[in-house]
Image: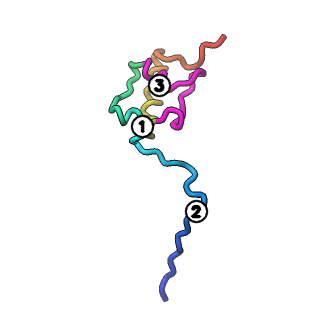
């Protein structure tokens, strides 16, 4: 007896989410590097409350998103970027 292969069925609605290419990443396009010593560059990726922006908002690839989060955390530790907002 032969084994039956399951037929592959396509979904009616298509893909729910668009997969993100590295070509869409701002840092990949410009071939720039982030560093904790550049707080002005890192502040672009932090919102008003001091939270790190998610990938869909920062428009970075996964590799650079992880790097950006690491550099922001380093800059916070040496007080180049505040941990939270300056509200009173």
Q: What residue is rendered at 42% in x and 37% in y? A: 25
> Residue 86 is drawn in which quadrant?
top right
Task: Determine the residue located farthest toward the right in the rendered image.
Answer: 88
Q: Secondary structure at mark 1?
A: loop
Q: Pointer 1: what residue? A: 25
Q: Secondary structure at mark 2?
A: loop
Tell me if label 2 and label 1 are in contact, CB under 8 Å: no
> Residue 21 is drawn in which quadrant?
top left
Q: What residue is rendered at 47% in x and 25% in y? A: 72
Disc 2 versus disc 1: distance between alpha carbons?
29 Å
Rendered location of residue 16, percent (x, y) = 58, 52
Question: Which is more toward the observer, 80 or 7?
Answer: 7
Q: Pointer 3: what residue? A: 72
Q: Pointer 2: what residue? A: 11
Highlighted magenta segment, given as a residue range? 39-59
Q: Does the magenta portion include 6? A: no
Q: Quadrant of the C terminus?
A: top right
Q: Earlier in the sequence, mark 2 or mark 1?
A: 2
- Specify few, some or many for label 2: CA neighbours under 10 Å numbering under 14, 14-19, or 20 or more: few
Q: What residue is rendered at 53% in x and 37% in y? A: 56
Rendered location of residue 65, percent (x, y) = 46, 35
Q: Earlier in the sequence, mark 2 or mark 3?
A: 2
Q: Earlier in the sequence, mark 1 or mark 3?
A: 1
- Specify few, some or many for label 3: CA neighbours under 10 Å numbering under 14, 14-19, or 20 or more: many
């Amino acid at each position: 007896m032969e084994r039956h292969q399951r037929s592959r069925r396509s979904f009616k609605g298509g893909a729910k989410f668009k997969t993100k290419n590295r070509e869409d990443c701002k840092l990949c396009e410009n071939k720039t590097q982030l560093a904790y010593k550049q707080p002005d560059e890192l502040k672009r990726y932090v919102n008003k409350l001091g939270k790190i922006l998610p990938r869909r908002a920062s428009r970075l690839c996964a590799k650079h998103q992880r790097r950006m989060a690491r550099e922001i955390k380093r800059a916070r530790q040496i007080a180049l970027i505040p941990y939270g907002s300056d509200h009173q």
